Amino acid sequence: VVELARALLRREDVELTLLVRPTAVDYARGELGLPAGRIVVAPTRRTLANSLCERTGLGIPALRRGFDIVHGTKHLLPASTTATTLLTVHDMTLVERPRDFAPLKRHLLARPYLASLRCADVLVAVSRAAAGQVAAHLPAAPAKTEVVPLAVAPALLTATPVPVPGLDPSRAALVVSDFSPRKNLPFILRCWPQVQAAREGATLAIVGPPPRPGSPGARALTVARRDIAGGVVHLGHVSDAQLRWLYERAQVTICPSLVEGFGLPALEAVTFSSPVLTSTDPALAEASAGRATAIPIGDEAAWVAAIVTALAAPRPASTRPAEARSWDQVAEETVAAARSALQARALASVARHHPTDHERGVRTAPRRDRLGAL
């Protein structure tokens, strides 16, 4: 959301207003440079209540402003808006894997999410795989879906690599992930004793937030640390400079997810010439653009063999990042999708009032669209 907002703010043809949590107001003003009049502060409530308020508009009168476009960047759109609506679709996990979420969230948000998908004027899917996931649930979705892939953050592309203290990258496999069930990290942790038995000193370096206490991921991490002391290192959050160093120096990057909507770590890894092992999930194949080795989900022997082979092979020389897709391109394609929907609504409106002259009243001159982003 932040990188898309930055790119939209660089455009002279878009006037962006952001709906933010109270804790993000200073960031929106200081880092993004938004004036106070274009920042809408959401009421302070629990996350789930905030999401439902976004859908109903309750307590957020600014959602009824005269925006040309209202863009839901994750899951929900306000039902009350009369603006052209755009919804970014990252995945269908909330519908397809409800037990990955807390009971209250999966019971209260799945239906509003599906309703938002149905009512949106245009759906922006982050990958062809995500578009396919939506189509499996909503057969009418493809007619209003545009695929707009994400991009690597500029801060990562321009960072000067900084080593992670105490980590020997020549023995390391890298995972960049949280511990949510679909990320499948317990599977890799179960494989690691076999990897270490075949490749002494092999280290699994995990970048990302810690697992929720008591979760399967937390239990798997505890067991791995106990059984293979020093073989698993959870680095937590690292700087862009350290992450770039890891991508450029680790022997291999591992992406074992059961299902993804996009697969940003796979894209980042191939951008920095890292050898990559992924599951056969379609989104990961798409993000890695054919430059990864895909291994069947759950085939433990195949994963162990592939990791051991990658750890033993000479690491390809690091090269300057491949010509990368930019967030300005993401913004350009997002705006184009929104304008196409705006024009379609204008044509439909004119057709209702002037059935013999469909073209009359359609604005074709350059314009500055007012966009509200949730």
Image (cartoon, grey):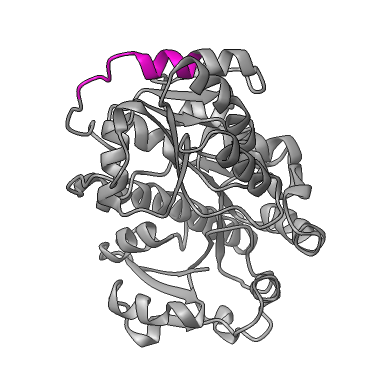
| Foreground pick, 246 / 68 | 246
Q: Give the range drawn in magenta.
A: 306-317
Up-down relation of residue 202 to residue 219 (above or below): above
Left or right: where 15 falls relative to 145:
left
| Foreground pick, 91 / 196 | 196
Estimate the x, y position of residue 216 in percent, counting from the top left. 70, 45
Up-down relation of residue 251 to residue 115 (above or below): above
Count of marks overlaid on the render: 0
Specify whether residue 357 is in view: no
Q: Does the magenta stretch include residue 250?
A: no
Left or right: where 99 falls relative to 277:
right
Estimate the x, y position of residue 99 in percent, counting from the top left. 78, 48
Which residue is rendered at x = 34% and y = 25% of the image? 251
| Foreground pick, 350 / 54 | 54
Estimate the x, y position of residue 14 in percent, counting from the top left. 34, 66
Q: Is residue 311 magenta?
A: yes
Estimate the x, y position of residue 349 in percent, counting from the top left. 59, 62
Specify whether residue 309 is in view: yes
Residue 248 in which image quadrant = top left
Which residue is rendered at x = 30% and y = 66% of the image? 9
Residue 273 in which image quadrant = top left
| Foreground pick, 113 / 273 | 273
Which residue is rendered at x = 38% and y = 19% of the image? 311
Residue 35 in which image quadrant = bottom left
- Name the image quarter holding the N terminus: bottom left
